Image: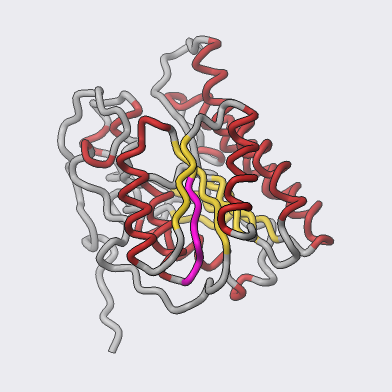
């Protein structure tokens, strides 16, 4: 018999610990530790024989997707920043514990050559590429009056927009019919926060990217979809630089708490799998009840 749970209390319901604003975005320094499904996700062979590249796959949502894909039968390559090597190795170990191949691809995706190379290396190391999850992102709290340096603005644009474009451009000629591209968008693309002005701009653009690319690639047999997370507890949140907001993070959602990365994994598995063979151009919301 399947046991149901109350979604309001399934995971930690704030207040979250006070943050000092210095978190560098690493799992081991995130308290409480996010749940990536390490102890809960059970696969059912929905992705056997598939080959996936996940950008930002070292922690947070990317780690949860890597765990789920591996337990569903896929081999997984993850790209990540070199300073996140420890997180990446821990994710790779979880993939390998599921009996699947894990490929580590360190590098800064804001560099075009690195972004393109990550795709080529994943394709070669995995023996193919038919799942591309564009998940890596960067955000920081911003001041009023669009007071964002050009250097910071450029970093957000190159991480959140340029890199996905470069990677898709490199990947599409390598991906056979039946492949799936999944883009991590955000509720910020629909309900933008002034404190995340530039980040929200990129997430809105990614929605258009998903829809246009789905129309373009449908005749080629490649599906393109997005997942729009709401307030999800990942190392990115305390690293954003808003210590006053962290304790109440996610409390404004109808379910009254932040989500955990593990609670998104099923959405990515669905969009990657044959169950979604007629689903393309869709943005799937996982927001705790907040409206897109």
Say whether residue 130 is visible. yes
Question: Residue 182 in the image: x percent, y percent?
Answer: 59, 54
Residue 205 in the magenta stretch? The answer is no
User: Magenta region's main secondary structure?
Assistant: strand
Question: Residue 168 in the image: x percent, y percent?
Answer: 68, 44
* Residue 197 against residue 126 in the figure, above or below: above
Viewport quadrant of the N terminus: bottom left
Colour scheme of the picture: secondary structure
Q: In this view, does 143 lie to the left or right of 160?
A: left
* Residue 41 against residue 88 in the figure, above or below: below
Which residue occupies 56% across, 37% down?
A: 203
Q: In this view, does 58 lie to the left or right of 151?
A: left
* Residue 42 against residue 37 in the figure, above or below: below
Tell me where residue 5 sits by quadrant.
bottom left
Which residue occupies 63% across, 52% down?
A: 123
Tell me where residue 88 sits by quadrant.
top left
Q: Give the range drawn in magenta.
A: 73-78
Q: Nearer the viewer, residue 124 or 147?
A: 124
Question: Residue 57 in the image: x percent, y percent?
Answer: 44, 47
Tell me where residue 272 sits by quadrant.
bottom right
* Residue 276 against residue 165 in the figure, above or below: below
Question: Residue 137 in the image: x percent, y percent?
Answer: 48, 36
Q: Which residue lies furthest to the right in this view?
A: 219
Which residue occupies 34% across, 68% down?
A: 41
How many marks on residues?
A: 0
Q: Which residue lies furthest to the bottom in this view?
A: 1
Which residue occupies 34% across, 47% down?
A: 89
Q: In this view, does 203 lie to the left or right of 104?
A: right
Say whether residue 226 is visible. no
């Amino acid at each position: 018999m399947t046991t149901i749970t109350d979604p309001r209390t399934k995971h930690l319901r704030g207040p979250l610990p006070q943050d000092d604003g210095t978190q560098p975005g690493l799992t081991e320094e995130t308290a409480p530790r996010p749940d990536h499904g390490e102890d809960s996700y059970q696969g059912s062979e929905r992705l056997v024989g598939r080959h996936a590249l996940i950008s930002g796959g070292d922690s947070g949502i990317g780690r949860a997707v890597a765990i789920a894909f591996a337990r569903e039968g896929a081999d997984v390559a993850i790209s990540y920043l070199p300073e996140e090597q420890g997180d990446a190795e821990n994710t790779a170990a979880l993939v390998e514990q599921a009996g699947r191949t894990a490929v580590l691809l360190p590098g800064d995706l804001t560099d075009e050559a690195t972004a393109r190379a990550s795709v080529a290396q994943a394709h070669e190391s995995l023996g193919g590429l038919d799942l591309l999850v564009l998940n890596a992102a960067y955000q920081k709290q911003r001041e009023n009056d669009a007071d964002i340096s050009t250097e910071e603005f450029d970093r957000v644009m190159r991480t959140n927009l340029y890199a996905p474009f470069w990677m898709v451009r490199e990947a599409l000629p390598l991906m056979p019919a039946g492949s799936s591209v999944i883009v991590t968008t955000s509720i910020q693309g629909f309900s933008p926060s002034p404190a995340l002005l530039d980040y929200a701009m990129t997430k809105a653009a990614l929605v258009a990217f998903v829809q246009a690319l789905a129309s373009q690639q449908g005749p080629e047999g490649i599906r393109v979809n997005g997942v729009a997370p709401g307030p999800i507890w990942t190392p990115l949140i305390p690293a954003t630089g808003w210590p006053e907001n962290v304790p109440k993070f996610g409390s404004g959602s109808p379910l009254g708490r932040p989500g955990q990365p593990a609670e998104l994994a099923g959405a990515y598995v669905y969009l990657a799998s044959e169950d979604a063979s007629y689903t393309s151009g869709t943005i799937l919301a996982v927001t705790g009840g907040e409206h897109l």
